[in-house]
Amino acid sequence: MTASGLLDRIMDVGRDRARGGYSRHAFDPAEAELREWFTAEAGWLGLDVETDRNGNIWAWWGAPGPDATVTGSHLDSVPGGGAFDGPLGVVSALDAVGILQRKGFTPGKPFAVVVFAEEEGGRFGVPCLGSRLLTGSIDPDKARALRDPDGVTLADAASRAGYDPSRFGPDREALSRIGRFLELHVEQGRGLIDLDSPVAVGSTVIAHGRWRFSFRGQGNHAGATLLTDRRDPMLPAAATVAAVRRIASEVPDARATVGRLVPTPGGTNVIASTVDLWLDARVPGTGLTESLVEDIAGAAAEAAEAEGCSVTVSKESYSDTVTFDGGLRDRLSGVLGGVPELPTGAGHDAAILAPHVPSGMLYVRNPTGISHSPEEFAEAADVDHGARALADVLEDLSR
Ligand code: HGY
Ligand code: MN
Ligand code: MN
């Protein structure tokens, strides 16, 4: 089954009728359906499937072992996300195994397809949760206590889905087996359109993080409270959203976003008592993301004081700039005949693994250049070209 054909099989799983696109999140029914689907597809390829202590799925072609060539991505999405971010890397890995099997290739070293859990952090707020737990990049107790928008903890959600959250944590055995990791991903930008190439090799992932700003004022009646008597946290929250764009536009190549803002209690005729907003900030280079956030936090504190409110800022996740392994990058480019190399502003599990094992990425052209939105797209011809390119490099890496 080709990668584009495999994508068609899951096209209706986790559709979000309200937001458009897909909402597939850690340990929810849609993701569970995708896990079952992946396990079946891997089984038909004769792969042995196991789920590790952190909810990541490993499909082994032959016996598990050291120096393994591992490829894969994630199946979860952002809320209202596109069909390709994550699943494209998974279906391409399955298709690549099929291509290699049909040509009679047998890996000369252990080989696995992996699906990482909660890469988007769409439910529990921390991106790449499965690969962070695996590599020890997040404290397991902090992870277990993460809450979704309904207040359900990761521990409870995992238990309800049949996992044992007490086992969450660094998995040295699983990590030590990985000889190299390669993730194929839909491009989240216009690089390949402008370069007129169907695939590229990844070079860097820029630093990025998420911060929660909590504004506190006085809840009250919208009609009975004079404007002069208010401490309305919505005012400093709104001022901060405007300040994010104003301050970030002064920093070369910075990206800063407020995509989520939640007033409490959230009534039309109610002055909010608190307003929470989440800042996603990303600046290439070292230390520049944090200094951007410091400037934004300063503007938030000023705006809060002017309205008689308070604000607390807490860092929820952060990843430094990552440069993928040069030797692996060169090898990928060599096998693929010198395709372009592209940086990205999007985070990936490959970047979480990069400090621990040689990691690399392949990108497949996205004619819209749009991602984290239903308009995200990849032509079937490019999808299948990407799977064949992945098969070629995996063959080279697995001899
Ligand atoms: O947010 C990101 O960059 C990635 O899509 N998780
Ligand atoms: Mn994404
Ligand atoms: Mn992704």
Image (cartoon, grey):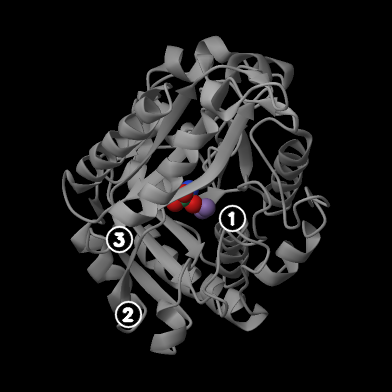
- Give the amino acid type for the residue marked by disc 3 in the picture: Ser
Q: Residues within 10 Å of mark 3 (few under 14, many from 20)?
A: few
Q: Distance of mark 3 from mark 1, alpha carbons?
A: 36 Å
Q: Earlier in the sequence, mark 2 or mark 1?
A: 1
- Dot label at residue 90: 1
Report the residue at 43% width, 22% height from top.
Answer: 309
Give the vertical position of 189 relative to 113 (above or below).
below
Disc 2 residue: CB within 8 Å of ligand 3: no
Residue 391: image location, x then y, percent: 49, 68
* Picture quadrant where residue 340 is located: bottom left
Residue 259: % across, % down = 54, 47
User: Would you name the residue on which mark 3 appears?
Assistant: 249
Q: Amino acid at mark 1?
A: Val
x 75%, y 40%: residue: 36
Element under disc 3: loop
Q: Is residue 19 above or below residue 368?
A: above
Q: Residue at x 60, y 15 (%)?
A: 155
CA gap between label 2 and label 3 equals: 28 Å
The residue to which callout 2 is attached is 340
* Mark 1, secondary structure of its residue: helix
Local packing at callout 2 (Cα closer than 10 Å; few below 14, some 14-19, many 20+) is some
Circles 3 and 1 in contact, beta carbons < 8 Å: no
Expressed as whole percent of the image width and height from the top left, the position of residue 127 reads 47, 38
Which of these two is toward me, 262 or 189? Answer: 262
Side of 206 where 33 appears, left or right: right
Going by the image, does 300 lie left or right of 85? left
Q: Residue furthest left?
A: 286
Q: Name the amino acid, label 2.
A: Pro
In front of the other: 168 or 372 = 372
Of tags 2 and 1, the one toward the viewer is 2
At numbered mark 2, what does the secondary structure look like: helix, strand or loop?
loop
The vertical placement of 193 against 148, above or below, is: below
